[in-house]
Image: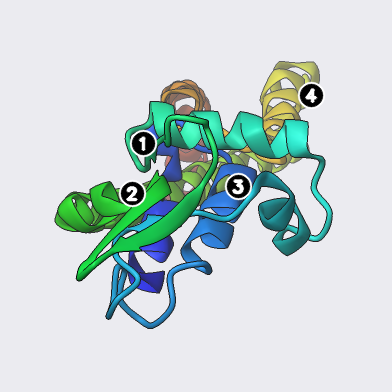
């Protein structure tokens, strides 16, 4: 059951879940004894009261807890099994046990889906990390080349826009950027670096021609 929780925590964005939604789910899982969901005689339904859940969540307000429960239900991660009077409880009728509360069976039936979603999220996070590193290195190259170009030219103002762009990019990288934003920065930096190189190359050619003479 804890592996399912870890997978959902990793893939929470795919299910529009927050950290606190996952925390409430963790509390519900803690009412299912054992390492497996529905292990032994407990079944797949847990039936703690709202106050008991809140106590396990270190005193989270019941109104807040109910809001997170609603999000878990809307995401299809748990189901309500309400009794006729709305209470949560379990009773035995001979050999049969009937429980009313929160049904955790979707976590069992969709465990493979959650694992695949977590793998996808981890892969996307790794790609995002690499893209962020690429943009950071391009920003550093632009800053260094702009500084070199300014030192070689009497018209240093021509290089200020590249220095400003590198500085603004550094500021942007302090935020948590999505792939589209990083792609936009990468394209802008690639164009700026191409412009920088086009301005530096004639100077190098000129210097080499003077040396040959």
Ranked by sequence position, the earlier of labels 2 and 3 is 3
Secondary element at image label 4: loop
Local crowd size for mark 1, using a 10 Å CA cut-off: few (<14), some (14–19), many (≥20): few
Earlier-in-chain disc, 4 versus 3:
3
Measure the C-alpha gap from mark 2 to mark 4: 45 Å
The image shows residue 90 at horizontal and vertical percentages of 42, 57
**Is residue 70 placed above or below 108 in the rendered structure?**
above
**Residue that badge 1 annotates:** 14
Tag 1 and tag 2, C-beta contact below 8 Å? yes
Task: Give the residue at mark 2.
Answer: 121
Q: Is residue 189 above or below residue 96?
A: above
Task: Give the label, 1 or 2, closer to the camera.
Answer: 1
Kindly tell me whether residue 126 is visible in this rendering.
no
Q: Nearer the viewer, residue 14 or 103?
A: 103
Q: Out of 198 and 26, give the one closest to the viewer.
A: 26
As displayed, is residue 44 above or below residue 152? below
The residue singled out by tag 4 in the image is: 156
Determine which residue is flagged by label 3: 19
Residue placed farthest to the front in the image? 94
- Is there a contact, CB below 8 Å, between mark 2 and mark 4? no
């Amino acid at each position: 059951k804890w592996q399912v929780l870890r997978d959902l925590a990793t893939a929470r964005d795919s299910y529009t879940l927050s950290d606190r939604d996952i925390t409430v789910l963790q509390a519900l899982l803690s009412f299912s004894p054992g390492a497996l969901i529905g292990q032994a005689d407990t079944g797949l339904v847990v039936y703690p009261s709202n106050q008991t859940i809140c106590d396990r969540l270190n005193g989270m307000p019941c109104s807040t807890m109910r809001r997170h429960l609603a999000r878990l239900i809307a995401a299809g991660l748990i189901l309500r099994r309400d009794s006729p009077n709305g209470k949560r409880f379990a009773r035995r009728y001979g050999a049969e046990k009937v429980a009313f509360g929160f049904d955790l069976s979707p976590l069992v039936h969709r465990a493979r889906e959650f694992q695949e979603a977590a793998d996808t999220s981890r892969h996307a996070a790794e790609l995002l990390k690499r893209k962020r590193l690429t943009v950071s290195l391009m920003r550093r190259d632009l800053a260094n080349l702009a500084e070199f170009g300014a030192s070689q030219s009497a018209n240093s103002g021509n290089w200020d826009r590249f220095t400003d762009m590198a500085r603004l990019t550094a500021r942007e990288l302090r935020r948590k950027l999505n792939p589209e934003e990083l792609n936009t920065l990468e394209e802008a930096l690639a164009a700026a670096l191409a412009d920088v190189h086009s301005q530096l190359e004639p100077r190098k050619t000129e210097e080499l021609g003077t040396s040959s003479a």
